[in-house]
Amino acid sequence: MKDYKVRLKDGTIITGDDFDQNDFEKLKSIFKKWLDINADLKSLKGRGLNVPDVFSEALFCIAFDAVRTNNDPGAHSYDCVIKATDEGVQVKSASIPNDCTSFGPTSTWDLLYYADFAPNGYVDGNVYFYEIDSADVYSLVLNQKKNETFADQQAQGRRPRFSMQSRIIREKGLKPVKKISLVD
């Protein structure tokens, strides 16, 4: 991993993390350790750990030739920036088939991606990336009684939450735009 300067669409220049094949091999090793930790936790009747943000974001960067913003204050709420287009990306992920994805009240993005670490119903080393249409998210009704949308909840300063899997990916019949494997 090395520092990489990238320009956002608004002209702001930020320094982010650029990942390479060596980092991918390291992520594969971390993945195996994460599986072991989760197995140990489950043997004690505990819950497994969620996918660490750095893990899904680094994999996204490697797969889509992007830079991780690493919380640079000029990067808005973007997790990554695609080098070729300067588009800011939010990366959401889960390792369970019925996720509860959360967004901050001021979350913004040019592109939204979902990394599914359990595309076959369980974690098996395959990760599927889905590109999510922002209009589908902003117009999604989250409170039926009040006919309240995702955008309404954000405007109220709340953290919208919903299942990306059931409410967007399965409901819309989305297909992954990229698949990667973390096992040899």
Image (spheres, rainbow, N blue to C red):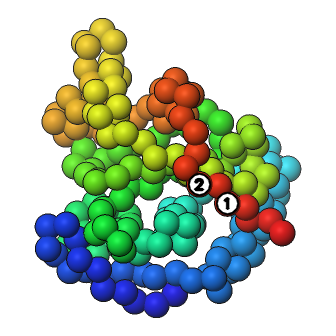
Q: CA distance from mark 1 to mark 2?
A: 7 Å
Q: Residues within 10 Å of mark 1 (few under 14, many from 20)?
A: some
- The kind of residue on which mark 2 rests is Lys
Judged left or right of residue 30, residue 168 is left
Q: Amino acid at mark 1?
A: Ile
Residue 65 showing in the rendered view: yes
Location of residue 143 with respect to 71 vertically, above or below: above
Q: Is residue 143 left or right of residue 166?
A: left
Assign a secondary structure to mark 1: strand
Residue placed at 35% from the left, 31% from the top?
A: 136
The reply to whether discs 1 and 2 touch (Cβ–Cβ < 8 Å) is yes
Q: Which residue is mark 2?
A: 178
Using the rendered view, name the quadrant where residue 81 is placed.
Answer: bottom left
| Residue 4 picture location, percent across and down | 37, 87
Total labels: the figure holds: 2
Residue closest to the eye, 21 or 71: 21
Q: Quadrant of residue 102?
A: top left
Other-residue count near label 2 (Cα within 10 Å), few / some / many at <14 / 14–19 / ≥20: some
Q: Which residue is mark 1?
A: 180
Task: Work out whether 60 lies above or below 94.
Answer: below
Q: Position of residue 184 (x, y in %)?
A: 83, 69
- Residue found at x 22% / y 63%: 76
Element type at mark 2: strand
Q: Position of residue 174 (x, y in %)?
A: 54, 35
Viewer-side residue, 6 vs 17: 6
From this view, report whether residue 79 is shown above or below residue 153.
Answer: below
Name the quadrant containing residue 68: bottom left
